[in-house]
Amino acid sequence: MVTFESAAGATVFSLPKKTPDKDCQPVKRDLLRQRLGTAYNDRYMAMDSTDLQNHLPPQNQYHVTKRNITKRSNSLTVEEITDPAPWTCQTSKVWKNLGPKYFPRHVRSVTCSTDKCWFDHFRCRPKYYTIKVLKKKEGQCLRVISSTGTPRFEDFWELHDYRITVGCECGH
């Protein structure tokens, strides 16, 4: 049997066993966040709909940076640009609801708002990044033994790779 002990040595986890989901107790969200560790990012993840309300609503933005501005326009700042450059792709921020089988439930992503760029000769293509989330394993519980020695079964969550769109790029 493989076991994991908490820092205080109070809780012991053993390998999951197959059992009906009705026998599993839910895991508190703070404990799930702790299990996700440094992979959790407040700016791009929301644990539930209440947490999601604390984030700003998504708004359109142009990915134009100071290095994209030509030398003739050194006096311009990014904030002053109203029309996107022909080599940029317009994006929209969106919050994706991954559903109850994932933690965190909501992740921030981007969609390409424009299809074409560079005078309609090129296409806007999404750029991806893989993040870590927890996914509930159906039909399996994790046996947890508390400091009092009383065993209980809780939902089994495992690390899962999830691909999100982080930007859009003008290309072939």
Image: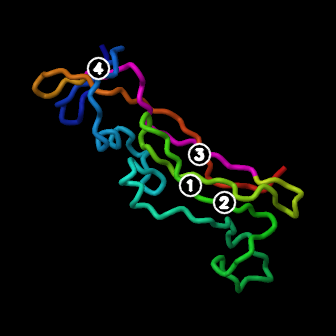
| Residue linked to disc 1 | 94
Locate residue 168 relative to residue 135 in the image: left or right.
right
Q: Amino acid at mark 2?
A: Thr
Label 4: which secondary element: strand
Q: CA distance from mark 3 to mark 2?
A: 14 Å
Tag of residue 111: none
From the top left corner, tell me how far across and down residue 12 is, in percent.
23, 25
Q: Position of residue 37 (x, y in %)?
A: 38, 43
Residue span colored magenta: 125-143
Mark in front: 4 vs 1: 1
Q: Earlier in the sequence, mark 3 or mark 2?
A: 2
In this image, 45 relative to 162: left or right? left
Q: Is the residue marked by circle 1 packed among few (<14), some (14-19), or many (20+) residues within 10 Å?
A: some
Which residue position holds label 2? Answer: 91
Query: What residue is drawn where x is 42% and y is 23%?
Result: 138
Q: For this view, does 94 lie left or right of residue 137? A: right
Q: What residue type is disc 4 on?
A: Ser
Q: Can you identify the residue that label 4 sits on?
A: 14
Residue 35, image quadrant: top left
Mark 2 lies on a secondary structure that is strand
